[in-house]
Image: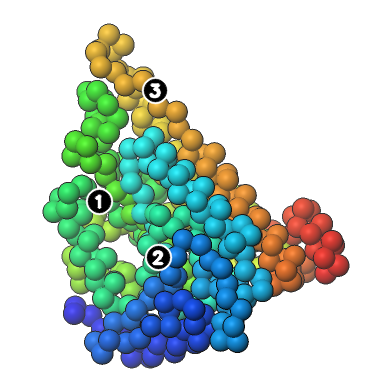
Amino acid sequence: MKYHHHQSLLDMVQSKLGWWSAETSSTKLQEGSTSGDGHVDSDLSDRDTPSCTPVRTSSVSRCGRCWLRWYNCFCTEYLNSRQAYYHDRWDEIQDQYQVEIEIVMFYHAAELGRSANTAHVFEHLCEGITKVIIYGDQEKEEELFKRIVDGSEGKLSRPEHTCLLYPCNESISLNQWIDNHFHYDSNQSDFSSSMRSTPGKRPLVRMIILDGTYPRAKHMMKFFKACKREFDLERNHHLDFVQLDLDLDKGIKSAVAGVMFQPAKDKICSYQATVMAIRQLLHLIEVRYKIINNSRNPLMENISPPIIFSGTQMCSELDEDLNNWIVYILQQKIKYGKPTPRKSLTDVDNQLPDHLKDVLVSCTIL
Ligand SMILES: [Zn+2]
């Protein structure tokens, strides 16, 4: 082991997993335990169970997948069918864009089981492309770092490119990151090989998302900074920190405005940030494809037919699903809305959108 987490963090993870095990005793999490070497079994859901039917027993208090109380479970009513939908959609998208996408949700243990957590909703919907690691699970963390090195150095069957989404002084724009990692070659006859990938093997883009409160996310970011040195990830851009290309003067309207407080105008929930990053990533690939296609000699043989890209549409659907989940937790009175903005948040638009006001009114909350 190249590093050791502070014992207080490992204790906190164990305590949280123990609590979660008791809350969801029908899931695999009941087996979550320390193996004696600091390893934590951090599977957050039963991956072998395609659908979730909450079992009404005195020992099960929460659904292990949507994290809501069993009587509020959103899985069978909504999330499971959407998950099946996105499973097929992601296959199409990865074919269109000629990349594999992997999202690593890196959770702080304090987030585990929090009903208002949005990252796990994304994880549930896009289970096929999402991997989960709990901060403090040293075995999985080291596995990730090794994979990043091997994937970057061509030791795997396909190239892998990893970035961590976190705005800080060393973050580069996603646009710049794409330029650093993908060298599109207009002399190639098809888009896949124009990315100089191994023939028949699409490159993988792995994006790590830090999920926790802002101070905790910052703490986890510092851990990654330290591990970049420890695992030699700074070499050849093995692990870059990236940020979205945003107009910060305008700020971003948080998808959970008026439901949860947004602490600053550039800080949004993990679900929204992940979808924005995917949208931008796909858009950047699409733009490069169009440039290559336009620059080709029309007389050149074997030109592939233009690709129909539908990433933007899928991202809009994901945004809609986040909104549907917010409506649901308001209707179920899991959240009551925060119609009065905090005085300290003068530059943040925390107004509940009108359609959510209507939901609160219909639930007689307002
Ligand atoms: Zn559920």
Q: Which mark is residue 208?
A: none
With respect to residue 332, does 203 lie above or below?
above
Residue underneath mark 3:
306
Left/right placement of residue 15 relative to residue 59 reads left
Residue underneath mark 1:
160
Near-viewer residue (46 or 282): 46
Which residue is depicted at the point 62% across and 64% down? 74
Left/right placement of residue 210 relative to residue 60 reads left
Residue underneath mark 2:
48
Mark 1 within 8 Å of ligand 1, using the beta carbon: no
Q: Position of residue 82 (x, y in %)?
A: 55, 52
Mark 3 within 8 Å of ligand 1, using the beta carbon: no
Which residue is depicted at the point 51% across and 73% down? 64
Q: In the rendered structure, which amino acid carries the disc numbered 3?
A: Pro
With respect to residue 269, does 334 lie above or below?
below
Disc 2 to disc 1, how far (Cα)? 26 Å
> Mark 3 and 1 residues: CB-CB less than 8 Å, in contact?
no
Tag 1 secondary structure: strand
Mark 2 within 8 Å of ligand 1, using the beta carbon: no
Disc 3 to disc 2, how far (Cα)? 38 Å
Q: In the rendered structure, which amino acid carries the disc numbered 1?
A: Glu
> Mark 2 and 1 residues: CB-CB less than 8 Å, in contact?
no
Which residue is depicted at the point 45% across and 32% down? 309
Q: Position of residue 109 (x, y in %)?
A: 45, 79
Q: Colour mode?
A: rainbow
Q: In the rendered structure, which amino acid carries the disc numbered 2?
A: Asp
With respect to residue 219, does 127 lie above or below?
above
Disc 3 to disc 1, how far (Cα)? 25 Å
**Label 3: how many residues lie within 10 Å, few (<14), some (14-19) or many (20+)?**
few
Q: Nearer the viewer, mark 2 or mark 1?
A: 2
Which residue is depicted at the point 35% across and 86% down? 33
Mark sitting earlier along the chain (2/1): 2
